[in-house]
Image: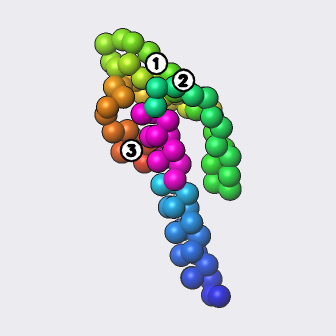
Amino acid sequence: MDLMSQAIQELIYFENLKKCIIDKITHDWNSKECIHEKIKNKYYDFEYMIEDCYNETGYRNLKFLHTGKTLNDYKFNDIKKWLRYIL
């Protein structure tokens, strides 16, 4: 296998991994549970917490514990675009 095909395979692996992580966090976002998870693999190592937070900006709160970035929004809103930007 040449270097170019290895790079393409690695890029495909990374994109699939990112999509799986986004799908998992989105699924957790839409659940009714308070969640504290850690994701660790070749490219990512972070913890996040999702909890209910009733205020004027929404009633769900997603916080990445390693950076402190937070999202307050409503559960019915799709957060995939925001996650793609963050990850």
Of 64 and 36, the residue lying toward us? 36
- Give how far apart the Cα atoms at labels 3 and 2 are: 19 Å
Mark 1 closeness class: few <14, some 14–19, many ≥20 residues within 10 Å: some
Q: Which structural element holds mark 1? A: strand
In the rendered image, the vertical position of residue 84 relative to residue 36, given as above or below: below
- Give how far apart the Cα atoms at labels 1 and 2 are: 7 Å
Q: What residue type is labelled 3?
A: Lys
> Which of the labelled discs sits on residue 18, or is there none?
none
> Which of the labelled discs sits on residue 34, or is there none?
2
> Which of the labelled discs sits on residue 80, or is there none?
3
Question: Where does residue 29 sit, x and y in percent of width and height?
Answer: 45, 33
**Magenta span: chief secondary structure:** helix
Q: Which amino acid does label 1 sit on?
A: Asp
Residue at position x 46%, y 26% in the image = 32
Which residues are drawn in magenta?
20-30
Residue at position x 54%, y 23% in the image = 34
